[in-house]
Amino acid sequence: MNEVKFDFAGNAITRLCGVKFPIFLGGMAAISGPALVAAVANAGGMGVIGGLRLPPLALRRWLQETRALTDQPFGVNLVPQFGGPDVFEAQFQVVLEEKPRLLSLFYAEAYSADMIPRAKDAGLVVMVQVGSVALAKKAIAQGADIIVAQGSESGGHLNRGTIGIMPLLPSIIAVAQGRPVLAAGGITTRDDVRALMSLGAAGVVVGTAFIATDESNAHPLYKQKIVEATTDDSEYRTGYSFGWTYGTPHRVIPNRDKWNLLRFIGGGARAIDKPRMARKLSLYAGQGVGKIHSVVPAAQRMAELALGLPLTNHVVL
């Protein structure tokens, strides 16, 4: 890969979060670990730890390990409905004590009125991911600093509903009361970034493209499936719902496990050594998967995405 040097003038997101580029790593459970988060942060983006299902001690360890790998801002994603209120409160206390720059929330409606003010009082920027205008209005009323418009093209678990990012994004921007809105769903290339920025997005959240990176915690067979998949292979389903409210939708690449047994242990999030078991993983992937053709360093993926921003001093060496 040629070395690419460029600058971005900055916007509300970069100023609020202290990052060079408004490109966020999706906080994917177990996959977005310290190595990947730090690599994205060191490349100028916002790395986000996937905190889902992490016991409080493990969450603290990941936060500390990430801080040892980067001096750049990073964040953590929590899904409050998992583990019950006591476990979540323990996770939240760890976040308040360790103070990453960003707290990202998903399926947090029942908790946000209490959590968001506490997080902001501790100096954290709070981002809430939503899939509808109604949820966006609620997050804004509860004090969210940043809204993520999650289109139905997104991999992994989704808000209920089937609204694509192109109609969803401007609808949420219209009710955001000046708050920056990030776009999520099917974003894998500079052209995707350019299109969504032209619609008014303040930045993007990218998950699937970062699964296929050297630093990702995903099993090698999972990465291989991402690279081999076509756009047609990403399916909207409700089968991998263990721990989630029954019927919570998600987008995956179908696998060889007829009964989806590995949903009970976290699916593709686990580094399983036996190929026979790995072939049964829940292969979460968004509709942009057909444009991912290789496993690359996270910094290279960041550079490709950043080229979709309105850049200055763009030089290829």
Image: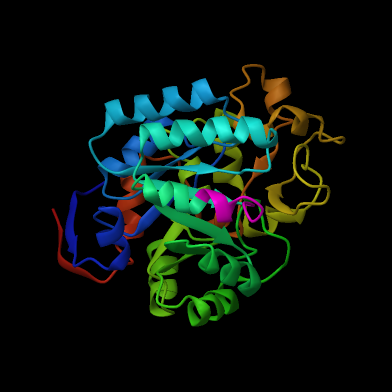
Percent x, y for residue 219? Answer: 57, 28
Q: Nearer the viewer, residue 82 or 26?
A: 82
Look at the image and name its color scheme. Answer: rainbow
Answer with left or right where residue 131 lies relative to residue 177: right
> For the point 56% across and 76% down, which residue is it?
166
Percent x, y for residue 186? Answer: 55, 61
Q: Give, as a single range, the part of the protein colored magenta.
A: 107-115
> For the point 36% across and 38% down, which residue is it?
99
> For the point 48% across and 37% down, which residue is it?
32
Tell me, yes or no, if residue 214 can be seen here. no
The quadrant where residue 88 appears: top right
Q: Nearer the viewer, residue 83 or 241?
A: 83
Q: Nearer the viewer, residue 53 or 222?
A: 53
Answer with left or right where residue 255 lies relative to residue 93: right
> For the point 40% across and 30% down, which residue is it?
63
Q: Is residue 91 magenta?
A: no
- Above or below residue 101? Residue 176 is below
Q: Is residue 111 magenta?
A: yes
Tell me, yes or no, if residue 267 can be seen here. yes
Answer with left or right where residue 90 lies relative to residue 145: right
Numbered circles on residues, count: 0
- Above or below residue 56? Residue 148 is below
Percent x, y for residue 95? Answer: 44, 36
